[in-house]
Amino acid sequence: MDFDTHFKTALDDLRSEGNYRIFAEVERQCGAFPKVRHFNGDDIDEVTVWCSNDYLCMGLHPDVIGAMVDAVGRCGTGAGGTRNISGNTHLHRVLEEELAQLHRKESALLFTSGYVSNWAALSTLGSKIPNAVILSDEKNHASMIEGIRHSRADKVIWKHNDWRDLDRKLKAVGDRPKIVAFESIYSMDGDIAPMREIVEVADAHGAMTYLDEVHAVGMYGARGGGISEREGLAHRITLIEGTLGKAYGVVGGYITGSTALCDFIRSFASGFIFTTALPPAVAAAATASVRHLKQSGTERVAQRDRVARLRARLDAMGIPHMQNDSHIIPVMIGDPVKCRMISDILMQDWGVYVQPINYPTVPKGTERLRITPGPLHTDADIDHLVMALTALWKQCAISHAVA
Ligand code: PLP
């Protein structure tokens, strides 16, 4: 086989559909964010980032940076091994204790990313609980879908956020071990799960609940424990999964739950066992970030204020955006080529960086700009973004494509 020809044909197909991914090359700088350096061929210009998942700018916080720098100075760079073979450091254990306390669970377990934590935990639960069935919300993230697929357990998809459909499907499964897998905030639409109803239904059928709080940890709840904390439901969820790479501004993923559950995953999950542990300095920085957001609401309040202001300004200018109760503002375009083009023009002509979100991240026909205001965006930044979008809206006549 001519492998390269195969690769190139597949890539050409992506290009012709408008779904070829082009990464913007940027560099954040402490003190300047959300302005970043943009490497544009031989030029370097300055653009404003509107699509960061470092939602609260904790990756630039002096306490978090200080913790990382200090730990690198003391402990060096890498962990030097898997958790099992010489890579299990004191800093990992401290972070796990912090995360267990955050969600008021007995135990926590770290992974190298949120993706890996979902993939490893769900594949282990599905494959190691005899006769298990996993009931998965139809909009669950790729990492959950892949974990479930890898487990080879039976899977039942329930309608998005529809607890009545979940109830029917749980009943139909009958007397088998059942795992209900869902997210608190869905990353692309920004909608929030009806958690209480889902938990009630799962309890009524004796099912375990697996909750992805990746877009909510640090952001919601009095101590940043996510939607499950805000709703007073954390104690009713069997397993809470989260990331250290979004609101906490570092990298890594984790699960929390009972001691037996975390020990079970620790002992059987290939994605935990056979990989080098997170660098200790990453664990130190994440601990500082989690601790800070447990006692400080300042960043959350400032971020919410920016979200409200941007929504109001978009409304005033007639730019349609998806309504939801979260911090994620999807501006619908509905066409992959237009979405890419608008994003390119925003970057080149307006110094505004919003990555286009196309298939397969979202279904075809629902392409969008996913805007995430942060606490450091100024009124002037917001005005500039809205002015740019308004000009483009007229220029591209895209209003018909908006859902
Ligand atoms: N779960 C959800 C819902 C996500 O949106 C993401 C990433 O965007 C992940 C898990 C993976 O988390 P991480 O980026 O830490 O790998």
Image: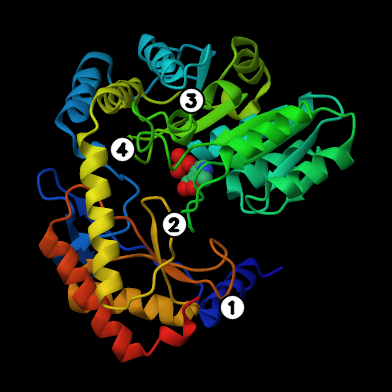
In the picture of the structure, the residue carrying the numbered disc 2 is 324
Look at the picture and state if 90 lies above or below 121: above
Residue 59, given in percent of the width and then of the height, sits at 25, 38
Residue 155, horizontal then vertical, whole percent: 79, 44
Residue 276: assigned label = 3
Q: Neighbour class for label 4 at 10 Å: few (<14), some, many (≥20)?
A: many
Label 1: how many Cα within 10 Å (few below 14, some 14–19, many 20+)? few
| Res 279 quadrant in image | top left
Q: Is mark 3 within 8 Å of ligand 1?
A: no
Give the quarter of the image for residue 198. top right
What type is the residue that disc 1 sits on? Asp
Q: Which residue is mark 4?
A: 249
Asked if the residues shown at circle 3 and circle 4 are in contact, with their CB atoms under 8 angstroms apart, the answer is: no
Q: Classify mark 3: residues with Cα within 10 Å, few (<14), some (14-19) or many (20+).
A: many
Tag count: 4
Give the CA distance from mark 2 to mark 1.
34 Å
| C-alpha span from label 3 to label 1 | 36 Å
Helix, strand or loop for disc 4: loop
Provide the residue designation for mark 1.
13
Q: Quick one: SS at disc 3?
A: loop
Q: Is residue 274 at all visible to an observer of this figure?
A: no
Report the residue at 55% width, 20% height from top. 235
Question: From what the image shows, is residue 325 above or below residue 259?
Answer: below
Q: Which numbered disc, 3 or 1, marks the residue that appears first in the sequence?
A: 1
Mark 4 or 2: the one toward you: 2
x then y, percent, for residue 296: 23, 28
Quarter of the image that includes the N terminus: bottom right
The structure residue drawn at horizontal position 17% and vertical position 54%, both measured from the top left corner, is 377
**Of pointers 2 and 1, the one earlier in the residue sequence:** 1
Which amino acid is tagged 3? Thr
Residue 386 in the image: above or below residue 370 = below
